[in-house]
Image: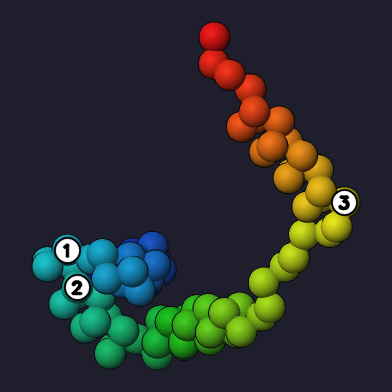
């Protein structure tokens, strides 16, 4: 496995979606390549940092608009 292939598989690895033949190749490459080990570390650090951010909320105007639209849609009868 080369570094480009490794980079393409990082998200699959993190999602536990690598097939049985790719997983050992991925782990072996990461063990041997300091650049890819660093890339993997940056990737997981970014995920961790983003996971700590507060979820964005809706503005009161957007919330009101959506609730109105949902109410109107639920009150409409299918023809």
- Specify which label sits upstream in the sequence, 2 or 3: 2
Q: What residue sits 33% from the left and 69% below the top? A: 15
Q: Nearer the viewer, mark 2 or mark 3?
A: 3
Q: Quadrant of residue 18?
A: bottom left
Q: What residue sits 85% from the left and 57% below the top? A: 60
Instruction: Name the mark on residue 19.
Output: 1
Q: Which residue is mark 2?
A: 23
Task: Give the camera-side residue of 1 and 78.
Answer: 78
Q: Which residue is mark 3?
A: 61
Work out which quarter of the rendered image holds the N terminus and state it.
Answer: bottom left
Secondary structure type for disc 1:
loop
| Residue 25, position as x, y percentages in the image | 19, 74
Q: CA distance from mark 2 to mark 3?
A: 48 Å
- Disc 3 crowd rating (10 Å Cα; few below 14, some 14-19, many 20+) is few
- Specify which label sits upstream in the sequence, 3 or 1: 1
| Residue 64, position as x, y percentages in the image | 81, 48
Task: Give the camera-side residue of 60 and 76.
Answer: 76
Q: What residue sits 31% from the left and 84% below the top? A: 30
Q: What residue sits 74% from the left and 65% below the top? A: 57
Secondary structure type for disc 2:
helix
Residue closest to the far top:
79
| Residue 6, position as x, y percentages in the image | 34, 70
Q: Residue 6: in sight, yes or no? A: no
């Amino acid at each position: 496995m080369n570094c480009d292939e490794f980079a393409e598989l990082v998200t699959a690895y993190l999602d536990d979606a690598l097939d049985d033949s790719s997983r050992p190749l991925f782990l072996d490459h990461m063990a041997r390549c300091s650049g890819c080990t660093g890339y993997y570390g940056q990737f997981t650090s970014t995920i961790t940092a983003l996971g700590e951010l507060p979820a964005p909320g809706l503005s009161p105007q957007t919330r009101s608009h959506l609730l109105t639209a949902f109410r109107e849609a639920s009150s409409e009868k299918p023809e």
